[in-house]
Amino acid sequence: MRIAMWSGPRNLSTALMRSFENRPDCTVVDEPLYAAYLSATGLDHPGRDDVLASQPNDWRVVAKEITSGPVGSAVQYQKHMTHHLLPEMDHGAFAGLSHAFLVRDPERVLTSYAKVREEPTLEDLGLPQQVALFEEFGGPVVDAASILASPRAALVGLCEALGIEFDEAMLSWPAGRRDSDGVWAPHWYSGVWASTGFAASSPGAADPLPSRLAPLLERCLPYYDRLAPYVMKVD
């Protein structure tokens, strides 16, 4: 099974990748479209040159690899950032994957993301792409807040929705970096490198929203509200 988990930034996405990677039957792929995204947009992200050198720059090559390339485990978990999916990238190329969606309250996303990029945009957050993918492919929708509040129950429900068995190993992991981490990890993953479970992975949860980002929050909310009715209920 190839699971494509589509998330915006600062959504607990790397911690969830850690959770799946700790399963003995699972390997992970970290943001496979990142280099293609940077190549197409010309954006100057931290570590840009290293990212471009580490992955194929053609999204078509990436799509072929992650949909039909060899996998050395029963489950492959692909961590995707929705903003990496540009208009010229045909969604149909990813149709063979088992799609799932990780969402988070946009206010919490913005308070966290603003710490690493002072002026994020709607395009940076990838919410329109996430809604478009959900409307095209469907799949389980899980909220980061549910995972933080009840990790075991949320992961049991997510695994059931994906058609795989839950594994207790998903609840904790050793601290530190992984060979599977993208080359951009030193710029973004310090919190996850220090973590051993979900409780330690909630950057910005108690911080107020900077007033300058209030208009952006208003633009984000309709997309979040579109997916909210489909979020898995966690007891």
Image (cartoon, grey):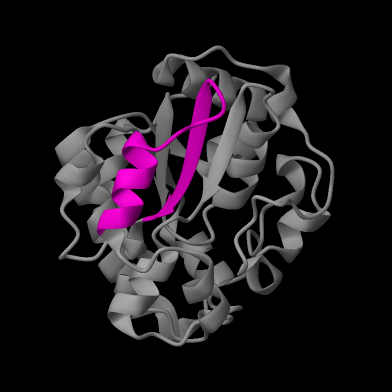
Residue 42 placed where, x, y %? 34, 86
Left or right: 65 with respect to 76? left
Report the label total: 0
Q: Is residue 67 magenta?
A: yes
Residue 166 versus residue 29 in the image, above or below? above
Check the image and report above or below for 230 versus 8: above
Q: Residue at x 79, y 50 (%)?
A: 195
Residue 17 left/right relative to 136:
right
Question: Residue at position x 29%, y 60% from top?
Answer: 59
Residue 162 located within the stretch drawn in magenta: no
Q: Is residue 163 left or right of residue 199?
A: left
- The x and y percentages for residue 149 are 64, 35
Question: Do we see residue 221 in this rendering?
Answer: no
Picture quarter containing residue 126? bottom left
> Residue placed at 66% from the left, 42% from the top?
18
**Residue at image x 28%, y 48%?**
225
- Find the magenta span and give its range: 60-81
The residue most toward the front is 70
Is 85 placed left or right of 193 in the picture? left
Q: Quadrant of the N terminus?
A: top left
Return the x and y of residue 227 as percentages of the image width and height.
28, 42
In depth, the one of 195 and 108 nearer the eye is 195
Q: Is residue 227 above or below residue 23?
A: below
Could you say where residue 189 lies in the image, as x and y percent from the top left?
A: 68, 63
In terms of image quadrants, where is residue 229? top left
Q: Is residue 208 visible?
A: yes
Quadrant the C terminus occupies? top right
Q: Nearer the viewer, residue 192 or 57?
A: 57
